[in-house]
Image: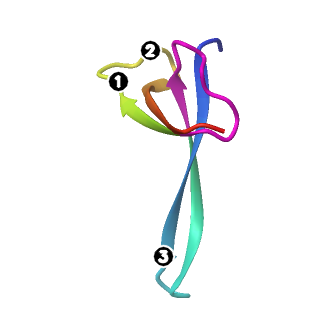
Amino acid sequence: MQKTAKVRVTRLVLDPYLLKFFNKRKTYFAHDPLQQCVVGDIVLLKALPERRSKHVKHELAEIVFKM
């Protein structure tokens, strides 16, 4: 998929039984019109009003930290 960035989001989730935090990962596909993202960038996503394709539901709002 051209002009699409694959973004992995990591969240900390508390296990109620163990009372310990674990990383929970989710992968999003985002439209990157200028193809300016590289691996390791920290980005901000914006939800699109409607889907661009079957998987793309977000758009790259800005690059917060460039690698």
In this rendering, is residue 19 above or below 47? below
Task: Estimate the x, y position of residue 19 in percent, counting from the top left.
Answer: 51, 87
Residue at mark 2: 52
Residue at x-position 37% and y-position 31%: 46
Q: Is the magenta stretch mostly helix, strand or loop?
A: loop
Instruction: Quadrant for residue 4, please give it.
Output: top right
Instruction: Quadrant for residue 6, please give it.
Output: top right
Instruction: Quadrant for residue 57, please give it.
Output: top left
The amino acid on which the numbered mark 2 sits, given as a three-letter code, is Arg
The amino acid on which the numbered mark 1 sits, given as a three-letter code, is Leu
In this rendering, is residue 65 above or below 12? above
Mark 3 residue crowding within 10 angstroms, few (<14) / some (14–19) / many (20+): few
Mark 1 residue crowding within 10 angstroms, few (<14) / some (14–19) / many (20+): some
Contact check, label 2 and label 1, Cβ < 8 Å: yes
**Mark pair 2, 1: CA separation:** 8 Å
Q: Is mark 2 on a helix, strand or loop?
A: loop
Mark 2 residue crowding within 10 angstroms, few (<14) / some (14–19) / many (20+): few
The amino acid on which the numbered mark 3 sits, given as a three-letter code, is Leu
Q: What is the magenta range? A: 28-42
Q: In this view, does 4 lie to the left or right of 49?
A: right
